Protein backbone atom coordinates (compact mmCIF):
# COMPACT_ATOMS: atom_id res chain seq x y z
CA UNK A 1 0.00 0.00 0.00
CA UNK A 2 1.15 3.48 -0.78
CA UNK A 3 1.98 5.95 1.93
CA UNK A 4 2.67 9.64 1.64
CA UNK A 5 4.75 11.54 4.17
CA UNK A 6 3.91 15.25 4.31
CA UNK A 7 5.43 18.21 6.09
CA UNK A 8 5.47 21.99 6.16
CA UNK A 9 8.13 24.51 7.13
CA UNK A 10 7.08 27.93 8.44
CA UNK A 11 8.89 30.96 9.81
CA UNK A 12 7.37 33.60 12.05
CA UNK A 13 9.56 36.41 10.71
CA UNK A 14 8.18 36.51 7.18
CA UNK A 15 5.48 33.83 7.42
CA UNK A 16 6.90 32.13 4.35
CA UNK A 17 5.92 28.52 4.05
CA UNK A 18 7.25 25.48 2.26
CA UNK A 19 5.43 22.21 1.69
CA UNK A 20 6.98 18.86 0.96
CA UNK A 21 5.72 15.35 0.37
CA UNK A 22 7.23 11.99 -0.48
CA UNK A 23 5.07 9.24 -1.93
CA UNK A 24 6.44 5.83 -0.99
CA UNK A 25 5.66 2.37 -2.30
CA UNK A 26 7.21 -0.30 -0.06
CA UNK A 27 9.66 2.31 1.28
CA UNK A 28 10.83 3.22 -2.24
CA UNK A 29 10.19 6.85 -3.13
CA UNK A 30 8.13 7.15 -6.27
CA UNK A 31 7.09 10.83 -6.23
CA UNK A 32 8.44 13.99 -4.59
CA UNK A 33 6.65 17.30 -4.23
CA UNK A 34 7.74 20.77 -3.16
CA UNK A 35 5.82 24.03 -3.14
CA UNK A 36 6.18 27.37 -1.46
CA UNK A 37 3.51 29.77 -0.28
CA UNK A 38 3.84 33.41 0.67
CA UNK A 39 1.53 34.03 3.59
CA UNK A 40 0.34 31.42 6.06
CA UNK A 41 -0.98 32.62 9.42
CA UNK A 42 0.46 29.87 11.64
CA UNK A 43 2.49 26.66 11.64
CA UNK A 44 -0.71 24.61 12.06
CA UNK A 45 -2.30 26.30 9.04
CA UNK A 46 0.89 25.52 7.11
CA UNK A 47 0.71 21.83 8.08
CA UNK A 48 -2.94 21.68 7.00
CA UNK A 49 -2.24 23.36 3.65
CA UNK A 50 0.71 21.05 3.09
CA UNK A 51 -1.37 17.94 3.78
CA UNK A 52 -4.17 19.13 1.50
CA UNK A 53 -1.74 19.93 -1.31
CA UNK A 54 -0.07 16.52 -0.98
CA UNK A 55 -3.48 14.83 -1.03
CA UNK A 56 -4.46 16.65 -4.21
CA UNK A 57 -1.17 15.88 -5.96
CA UNK A 58 -1.24 12.12 -5.31
CA UNK A 59 -4.94 11.94 -6.18
CA UNK A 60 -4.31 13.73 -9.50
CA UNK A 61 -1.70 11.09 -10.28
CA UNK A 62 -4.16 8.25 -9.82
CA UNK A 63 -3.52 7.06 -6.27
CA UNK A 64 -6.80 6.00 -4.63
CA UNK A 65 -5.69 3.87 -1.67
CA UNK A 66 -3.17 5.61 0.54
CA UNK A 67 -2.01 6.30 4.07
CA UNK A 68 -0.80 9.82 4.80
CA UNK A 69 1.77 10.35 7.52
CA UNK A 70 2.41 13.60 9.38
CA UNK A 71 4.63 14.60 12.27
CA UNK A 72 2.04 17.17 13.39
CA UNK A 73 0.03 15.48 16.13
CA UNK A 74 -2.23 18.52 16.51
CA UNK A 75 -3.28 18.32 12.85
CA UNK A 76 -3.95 14.61 13.19
CA UNK A 77 -6.26 15.24 16.16
CA UNK A 78 -8.18 17.86 14.17
CA UNK A 79 -8.58 15.64 11.10
CA UNK A 80 -9.70 12.71 13.27
CA UNK A 81 -12.17 15.06 15.00
CA UNK A 82 -10.63 14.41 18.41
CA UNK A 83 -10.26 18.17 18.87
CA UNK A 84 -11.81 21.25 17.33
CA UNK A 85 -10.24 24.63 16.71
CA UNK A 86 -12.54 27.34 15.31
CA UNK A 87 -9.61 28.96 13.47
CA UNK A 88 -8.99 25.69 11.59
CA UNK A 89 -12.55 24.69 10.67
CA UNK A 90 -12.25 25.56 6.96
CA UNK A 91 -8.88 23.86 6.52
CA UNK A 92 -10.02 20.68 8.26
CA UNK A 93 -13.24 20.60 6.22
CA UNK A 94 -11.22 20.92 2.98
CA UNK A 95 -9.03 17.99 4.08
CA UNK A 96 -12.06 15.84 4.93
CA UNK A 97 -13.71 16.61 1.58
CA UNK A 98 -10.54 15.62 -0.27
CA UNK A 99 -10.19 12.48 1.88
CA UNK A 100 -13.63 11.28 0.77
CA UNK A 101 -12.40 11.20 -2.83
CA UNK A 102 -10.03 8.32 -2.02
CA UNK A 103 -11.29 4.72 -2.04
CA UNK A 104 -9.16 4.00 1.02
CA UNK A 105 -7.78 6.89 3.08
CA UNK A 106 -6.04 6.95 6.43
CA UNK A 107 -3.77 9.34 8.25
CA UNK A 108 -1.34 8.59 11.03
CA UNK A 109 1.31 10.24 13.17
CA UNK A 110 5.01 9.57 12.65
CA UNK A 111 7.85 10.99 14.77
CA UNK A 112 9.68 13.94 13.25
CA UNK A 113 12.85 11.86 12.82
CA UNK A 114 10.99 9.47 10.52
CA UNK A 115 9.69 12.35 8.39
CA UNK A 116 13.08 13.72 7.38
CA UNK A 117 12.50 13.45 3.61
CA UNK A 118 9.32 15.53 3.58
CA UNK A 119 10.88 17.93 6.10
CA UNK A 120 13.92 18.42 3.88
CA UNK A 121 11.70 19.17 0.87
CA UNK A 122 9.52 21.60 2.85
CA UNK A 123 12.55 23.53 4.13
CA UNK A 124 14.07 23.66 0.65
CA UNK A 125 10.78 24.94 -0.79
CA UNK A 126 10.51 27.63 1.90
CA UNK A 127 14.03 28.86 1.13
CA UNK A 128 13.10 29.68 -2.47
CA UNK A 129 12.17 33.32 -3.00
CA UNK A 130 10.42 32.76 -6.32
CA UNK A 131 6.96 31.14 -6.33
CA UNK A 132 7.19 27.58 -7.58
CA UNK A 133 5.79 24.06 -7.57
CA UNK A 134 7.74 20.91 -8.36
CA UNK A 135 6.29 17.40 -8.49
CA UNK A 136 8.57 14.75 -9.98
CA UNK A 137 9.96 11.26 -9.59
CA UNK A 138 13.53 12.52 -9.10
CA UNK A 139 15.08 14.94 -6.65
CA UNK A 140 15.33 18.33 -8.43
CA UNK A 141 18.86 19.17 -9.61
CA UNK A 142 19.02 22.32 -7.48
CA UNK A 143 18.60 20.04 -4.43
CA UNK A 144 21.58 17.84 -5.30
CA UNK A 145 23.37 18.95 -2.12
CA UNK A 146 20.69 17.25 0.01
CA UNK A 147 19.85 14.32 -2.27
CA UNK A 148 21.49 11.89 0.16
CA UNK A 149 18.96 12.86 2.82
CA UNK A 150 16.16 11.83 0.49
CA UNK A 151 17.11 8.13 0.54
Image: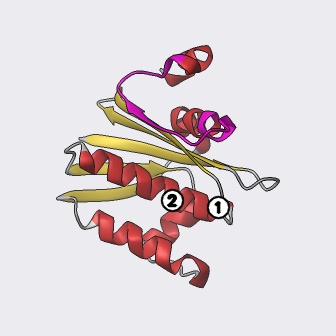
In this rendering, the answer to whether 126 lies above or below 49 is: above
Residue reaching furthest to the right: 13
Instruction: Using a 10 Å C-alpha cutoff, classify the residue at mark 2 as few (fewer than 14 neighbours), some (14 to 19) or many (20 or more).
Output: many
Q: Quadrant of residue 31?
A: top left
Please identify the residue farthest to the bottom as the structure is shown: 86
Identity of the residue drawn at 57% across and 19% down = 142
Quadrant housing residue 32: top left
- In the image, is residue 144 above or below residue 123? above
**Residue at figure coordinates x 64%, y 37% from the top left:** 123
Q: Residues within 10 Å of mark 1 (few under 14, many from 20)?
A: some
Queried whether the magenta region covers residue 130, the answer comes back as: yes
Question: Which element is circle 1 on?
Answer: loop
Looking at the image, which residue is at 58% across and 80% down? 85
Asked if the residue under mark 1 is in contact with the one under mark 2, i.e. CB atoms within 8 Å, the reply is yes
Q: Which residue is mark 2?
A: 49
CA distance separating discs 2 and 1 = 9 Å
Which of 16/102 is in front?
16
Q: Which residue range is magenta in the image? A: 124-141
- Percent from the top left, x then y, of residue 12? 79, 56
**Residue 141 badge:** none
Where does the N terminus fall, quadrant-wise? top left
Residue 21 magenta: no
Residue 18 lies, with reference to residue 103, above or below; the image says above
Q: State the image coordinates of residue 52 (x, y, percent, origin top left).
A: 42, 58
Q: Is tag 2's residue or tag 1's residue first in the polypeptide sequence?
A: 1
Amino acid sequence: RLRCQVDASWTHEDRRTGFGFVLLDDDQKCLLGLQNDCITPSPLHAEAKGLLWGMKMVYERGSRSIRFETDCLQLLKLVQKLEEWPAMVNEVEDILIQARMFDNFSISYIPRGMNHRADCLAKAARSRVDPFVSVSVETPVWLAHVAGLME
